[in-house]
């Protein structure tokens, strides 16, 4: 198959850009998994014991959807030494599309809810955020005419060693260039879709975790209303867990004796206190 100089130049550009995207994607994936491994010890005591609610659901989705996405993206984008049937390829691309959109959407929701909580959960701020979000959403979808122009073109795209006519080439092109970060349309971000796929969910889950373990009383009251439960005995930060569990256990043991009105238990408790005091005097 002979290619015209124009087609050859286009194909060369696409192949070069594909290689660059591969290296960038590996860097983003490595960053995400490294962050996941070093923060799992914070996640388990802070979030897992929580009851199912807004905060826990958003955290788990923004935390674990990128893992599914990286697996799908690695099979779809990176060179693999296996043969994948066409139907499986189609299903893989559809699954990657759905996972990508879901991850971006839940990250946006997480950031908006956290911002709403940080602003004191006031309705006027929520209305402003919704208005700005809708405006940005509408402006972002002005990109659709460009997609339509690509659909009507005869461009060839390079798909892992094979030249495919549209629509497969169109899907590859859209997958590489036409999915900008959902809330960032600045110049230079449209060619970095992995930033929206991996780094933004990472930041969203990190923000949720920080809000769960915050020690600010005012913020704790707002967070407990919107995101996480604030029930005595639930797990927060590691220091809070030890203090809370210890205080609950001590109150339970001492309180049971008092509530039952057991004079013998109270006398034994007083005698043990006196004995400890006498022993300490002897050693002194």
Image: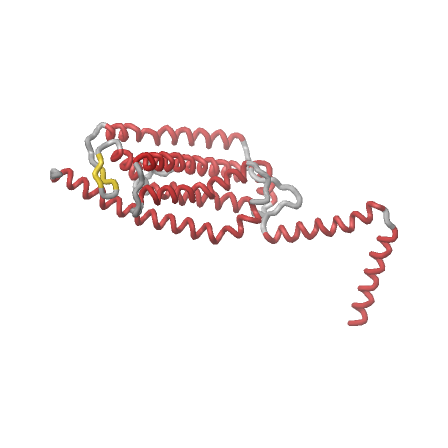
Q: Give the camera-side residue of 130 and 8.
A: 8
Residue at (21% x, 33% y) in the render: 165
Q: Which colour scheme is used?
A: secondary structure
Q: Where is residue 276 in the image (x, y as percent from the top left)?
A: 80, 64
Residue 147 point in image, percent of width and height = 28, 30
Q: Which residue lies furthest to the bottom in this view?
A: 283
Residue 217, percent from left and from top: 61, 44
Find residue 174 and report its image quarter.
top left
5 horizontally vs 78: left or right:
left
Judge from the rendering whether residue 102 lies leftward or rightward of residue 77; answer left or right.
Answer: right
Position of the C terminus by quadrant: bottom right
The answer to which image quadrant residue 163 occupies is top left
Q: Is residue 187 visible?
A: no
**Closest to the observer, 202 or 221:** 202
- Relative to 243, residue 127 above or below: above
Q: Which residue is drawn at 70% across and 51% down?
A: 247
Q: Where is residue 4 in the image (x, y as percent from the top left)?
A: 11, 38
> Is 218 or 271 nearer to us in this picture?
271
- Seen in the picture, residue 247 relative to 58 is either above or below; the reply is below
């Amino acid at each position: 198959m002979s290619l015209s100089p124009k087609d050859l130049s286009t194909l060369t550009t696409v192949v070069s850009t594909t290689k660059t995207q591969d290296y960038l994607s590996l860097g983003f994936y490595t960053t995400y998994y490294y962050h996941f491994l070093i923060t799992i010890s914070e996640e388990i005591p802070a979030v897992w014991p929580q009851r199912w609610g807004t905060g826990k659901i958003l955290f788990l989705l923004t935390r674990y959807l990128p893992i599914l996405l990286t697996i799908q993206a690695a099979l779809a984008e990176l060179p693999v030494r296996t043969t994948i049937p066409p139907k499986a390829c189609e299903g893989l691309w559809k699954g990657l599309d759905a996972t990508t959109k879901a991850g971006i959407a839940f990250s946006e929701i997480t950031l908006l809810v956290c911002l709403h909580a940080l602003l004191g959960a006031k309705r006027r701020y929520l209305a402003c955020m919704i208005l700005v979000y809708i405006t940005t959403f509408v402006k972002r979808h002005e990109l659709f005419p460009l997609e339509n122009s690509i659909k009507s073109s005869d461009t060839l795209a390079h798909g892992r060693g094979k030249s495919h006519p549209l629509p497969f080439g169109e899907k590859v092109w859209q997958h590489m260039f036409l999915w900008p970060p959902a809330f960032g349309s600045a110049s230079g971000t449209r060619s970095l879709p992995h930033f929206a796929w991996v780094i933004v969910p990472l930041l969203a889950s990190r923000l949720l975790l920080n809000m769960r373990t915050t020690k600010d009383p005012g913020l704790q009251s707002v967070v407990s209303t919107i995101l996480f439960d604030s029930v005595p005995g639930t797990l927060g930060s590691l220091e809070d867990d030890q203090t809370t569990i210890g205080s609950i256990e001590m109150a339970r043991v001492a309180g049971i004796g008092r509530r039952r009105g057991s004079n013998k238990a109270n006398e034994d408790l007083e005698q043990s206190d006196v004995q400890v005091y006498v022993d300490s005097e002897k050693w002194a």
